[in-house]
Amino acid sequence: MDRSRTFEAIRDRAKPWDIVVIGGGATGVGCALDAVLRGLDVLLLEQHDFGKGTSSRSTKLIHGGVRYLAQGDLRLVREALSERSTLLRNAPHLVHTQEFVVPCYGKWEKLFYGTGLKIYDLLAGRKRIGRSKILTRLETIERLPTVSTEGLSGGILYHDGQFDDARMLIDIATTADGLGASLINYAKVQELLDDDRGSIVGVKFLDAETGEVHKAWSRTVINATGAFCDSIRKLADPGTHPVVTFAQGSHIVLERRFLPSNTALMIPKTGDGRVLFCIPWHEHVIIGTTDIPVAAAELEPEAQEAEIDFILRTAGGYLAIQPTRADILSVFAGIRPLIGRTGVETTAVLSRSHEIFVDRNLITITGGKWTTYRRMAEDAVNKAVEIGGLGATNGVTEKFTISSPEKIDGLPLHGRLPYTKGDVIRAVRHEMACTVEDVLARRTRALFLDAAAAIESAETVARIISEETSNTRYDATNDVESFQLVARAYLGNPRS
Ligand SMILES: Cc1cc2nc3c(=O)[nH]c(=O)nc-3n(C[C@H](O)[C@H](O)[C@H](O)COP(=O)(O)OP(=O)(O)OC[C@H]3O[C@@H](n4cnc5c(N)ncnc54)[C@H](O)[C@@H]3O)c2cc1C
């Protein structure tokens, strides 16, 4: 992926695009890949970096959603379980089967959760990725060596998928780019362009690197801006009613010693009636998530003190070693775009299904889950084909394999991080990383694993970007300062 080459392609373009996609989250890059595979000309515009929104801030699960099973949303669970098996096939280098154990503290819990997880297996049908099983107390402790043992009667073993969300997104983007799609980051859509019959025929966008405003003409426009989708819908129809409600979810990241195992721990009932996961991830443990209503979507939401305390308290109740504020290596928050009523007291009850809305001929796709991104993209492109009369064939992403740009060897970036300087070079040369944050938050996951180590790596990364970038305006000192400003909010204990 090369930003200046992509810009040249846009400038030289005489005919309209088939599809302009607004938003470079999971849904948007999924649309770009789906469209280019159907032979359509597609341009994707992302206002910040690819994955800056919710799609880099998930729990990293490709799952049916045990919680949605408890809520009785069987259609969503079945659809997501089917997508789980598709994604395990589409991106085997990024999505893997993960063992989970639900620890039980009483015989009724074993029966209750054991039955629920058998239903979860049944809903997956032939796409099941492992058989759930009741474990003895000893088997539970073997799998979860740091589980709290007081009153422990056993556990339930089950399976789901796990992945690296931002890495997957970047790989989908580079794969789409390699097939001929055009994707640009730091390109914010400001206006929709109309023809004299009142149809939307393109977008006006700002290139944040140069400050220039450009127009891109297109036969259809897909709005894949997640939690921001209502602001784009208002550009199409100022009188339109908002469809999205915002729910923030936060996670903390700890050292592996809190759960020194390849098995994840699932807490089936938190104080607010949800589930909480403690999951091994890149040699660390990620714990979350919360689910609280917030008033607005933000690009860089911050975890609230009460959310952090809730996660520490709830996880601490199930772990033999109690994590404290001082143990947190990173804390991050994301905003779920949920379709539903605004002003609800608890967003946990709102559905995670996706929906398409059409305002004039603007196609909005929102809601949903990372797990269902491929299906969402297929639905949105089907709608674009129908509305724009694009005459394209059916989607083929179900059987398509996503690839990664080749690794480049390099010396370690930082003693506490699993990345090399080669990873930074690859990010700048092949993955359109423009800033230190792009590299440390989304091309690598340094910021999410260990915020202090990421801050300590910033100058080295800026030096490599200076050497590799074709952007003559790049200012390393400024970039390091901007990164530090963002990264400080990820430090679990800013007072230490
Ligand atoms: C805490 C949390 C945990 C989750 N865990 C899971 C999980 O484990 N598994 C799962 O399946 N799902 C999970 N989800 C849900 C999943 O992460 C989201 O459904 C998904 O990432 C939404 O992707 P999206 O592309 O629709 O939105 P986003 O990723 O937010 O992308 C929208 C993009 O649009 C861009 N944009 C906005 N306005 C403009 C504009 N004017 N011009 C150009 N670009 C613009 C934004 O910058 C953003 O990058 C979780 C969500 C949260 C919040």
Image (spheres, rainbow, N blue to C red):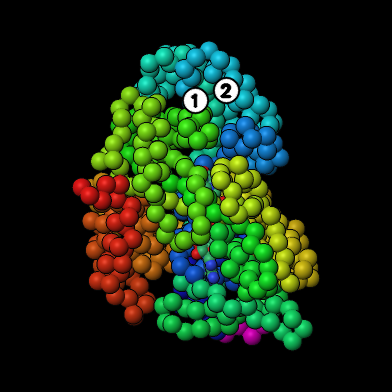
Q: Find out if the beta carbon at label 1 lies less than 8 Å from the nearest ligand 1 atom.
A: no
Observer able to see residue 120: yes
**Which amino acid, by three-letter code, is at mark 2?**
Tyr
Determine the main secondary structure of the stretch shown in magenta. loop
**Mark 1 is on which residue type?**
Val
Q: Which residue is drawn at 60% across and 83% down?
A: 13
Mark 1 lies on residue:
102
- Does the rendering let one see residue 169? no
Identify the secondary structure beneath mark 1. Answer: strand
Q: In this view, does 76 lie to the left or right of 272?
A: right
Instruction: Pinpoint residue 305: horizontal percent, then vertical percent.
Output: 36, 46
Q: How crowded is mark 2: few (under 14 residues within 10 Å), some or many (20 or more)?
A: some
Disc 2 C-beta below 8 A from ligand 1: no
Residue 351 coordinates in the image, percent (x, y):
64, 45
Where disc 2 sits, the SS reads helix
Label placed on residue 233 = none
Residue extent of the magenta highlight? 12-16
Residue at point 72%, 65% (across, down) = 358
Q: Quadrant of the rendered structure where residue 378 is? A: bottom right
Task: Identify which residue, 56 or 251, lies in the foreground.
Answer: 251
Mark on residue 113? Answer: 2
Q: Camera-side residue: 223 or 107?
A: 107
In the rendered structure, which disc, 1 or 2, sits on the residue that comes first in sequence?
A: 1
Magenta span contains residue 255:
no
- The x, y position of residue 324, in whole percent, is 29, 36
- Taking 481 as reference, is 343 above or below it? above
Image: 12 above or below 462: below
